[in-house]
Every structure is written in C-alpha cells, then in structure tokens.
Amino acid sequence: MSESVFSQHSVAVVVGASRGIGLALSAALVKHPRFDHIVACAREPDQCPELQALIERSDGRVLGHAVDVTRAASVSALGQLLDRNGFRPALVLNAAGLLHKGRRLRPEKRLEDIDFEAMQAVFAVNALGPALVMRELMPRMAPTGKRVFAALSARVGSIGDNRLGGWYAYRSSKAALNQLLKTAAIEARRRFEGLVVAALHPGTTDTALSRPFQARVPEDKLFSADFAARRLLEVVEVLGPGDSGGFFAWDGQPIPW
C-alpha cells in the first residue's frame, strides 16, 4: 500500500448510491477535499429521499443519475453521461448488491433451496452488473494520477475462507465478482498504467441487505453505514498499483481468494 493521494478537482462515481453503504460513500466523498464532483447512481434516484437530500445540499457537487446495472443500455448511458460532462473519474465505487428480495429470493441453507431464477437475479446484480460497469467506466477513467476502481465484495465470497457453507447464490456471485476484478486488474496493468482495481469487504453493516441476518453478530462487529464508508475510503486512500488485483477488508487487511 502507498500514501499517494487523489488529484485536486477529481471526479468520483458511486454505483448503488440509493441507500446503505453506497449512499454513505457518496456523502463521505462530498466532504473529501479532492473531489469536486460525485456522480451518485441508483435505479430510481428520484425515489430515494436521502439521496435527493444529499444532492440538494451539495451545492451542485453531487449529480444523481439513473442506472440499472442489470441492463447493458443503462450502464452504457452512464458512460455517455460522463462523456457529455467531460468527466474522467479518478474513483469508481460499485456498491450495488443483492442478497435477498421478497419470499422467494433468500440465502440458501441447503442444496434443495437453490432456485434458478433467484440465482440468476443475484448473479445479475452482484457479478454481471459490475462487469458492465467495468467495461464502460474503466476506459473512461482519468489517464494519470491516482485512480481506483473498487467494488464491494464480501468475505463470504472467499473460497479459501468458506468454512460454513450455505448462501450458494450470494457466495458464488461474490466469488465471480472477485475473479472479474482480478482479471480486469491484469488487463489494466497492460492498458491503464497505474490504475488500481480492488475488491473490498465492508464488514457486517447495519443496512437493509444484512438486517435479517444480524441476530448473531456481536455488537462491536456490526458497523453503521457511515463507519463502513469512512473505513473503506481510508483503505482506498492508501491503495497503490502494487495492491491492484487484491481483496481487502475494511481495516486494510488482505482476504484470501
């Protein structure tokens, strides 16, 4: 890791900024002295009161944009928005994620719980969507200076750290995300010198994604979204080219693949 800093007047993009960690990351970046513009993306930003409030009090620094990571045309439109505004991001953070939705889409406890359509939905948000974001945004990132493309993964996506089993769709989709990021990091070394690509684990955070599964989490291991966002940005701040292709926890510690 290094002590390099982002350039003055940088642009950041946060995908999945409607609530939770993505919203908290957007809010933290507004306070960052080196970022002039933050593009905060959500499926329906107009329907996100907290995001709208952040936009309104940002003095024009936060631009809300509608992005559905499961639709290629929607992600391509994000790239076109950056082009129109002359934005070359120094930082891209993908915080979109799916663990559960309604009664049908829940973490599996056994093989018999695997549902094809539910697994498709989880992979679409957690792996395929970030791949589209990589495709559209990595070539559009700033050509020089400190640059980081990071996506929120999860420790449960680590194959080497899997001791409990279960959660087939979520675990495997995050493992797929990790492989996508690792592969993109290898390509970035050839095409985008100095660009850091990393997977980040935010810890168990008190958000809608994890709320149904917090019962056994010790109080001191359950983080607020604001705390997780601050710690993740601290990790991002010290990532250097030698860290590209790595998987890091909220405290900067590497996680096995």
Image (spheres, rainbow, N blue to C red):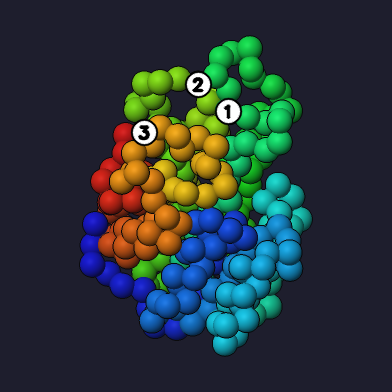
Q: Is residue 85 left or right of residue 173?
A: right
- For image coordinates 32% across by 62% down, the residue present is 234
Do the residues under discs 1 and 3 have CB atoms within 8 angstroms?
Answer: no
Say few, some or many: other residues with alpha carbon within 10 Å of mark 2 (under 14 / 14 to 19 / 20 or more): some
Q: Is residue 193 visible?
A: no
Question: Dot 3 corresponds to which residue?
Answer: 257
C-alpha span from label 2 to label 1: 7 Å
Question: Of label 3 and label 2, which has the lower sequence position?
Answer: 2
On residue 166, the disc is: 2
Q: Earlier in the sequence, mark 1 or mark 3?
A: 1
Q: Is residue 32 left or right of residue 138?
A: left
Q: Amino acid at mark 1?
A: Pro
Which quarter of the rendered picture does the N terminus lie within? bottom left
In this view, the residue in front, 26 or 144, is 26
**Mark 3: amino acid:** Trp
Give 74 or 191, whichever is nearer the viewer: 74
Camera-side mark, 1 or 3: 1
Kind of residue indicated by mark 2 = Gly
Q: Residue at x 34, y 26 (%)?
A: 160
Front-most of 34 and 142? 34
**Picture coordinates of residue 66, whole percent (x, y):** 71, 64
Q: What percent of the width, then of the height, locates residue 203?
A: 38, 45
Q: Crowding at label 1, few (<14), some or many (≥20) Cα neighbours within 10 Å?
A: many
CA–CA distance in space, label 3 to label 2: 17 Å
Helix, strand or loop for disc 2: loop
Q: Position of residue 72 (x, y in %)?
A: 73, 51
Residue drawn at x 38%, y 81% as measured from the top left: 33
Q: Which quadrant of the structure image shows residue 255?
A: top left
**Residue that badge 1 annotates:** 107
Position of the C terminus by quadrant: top left
Compare residues 203 and 146 and report the one nearer the observer: 203
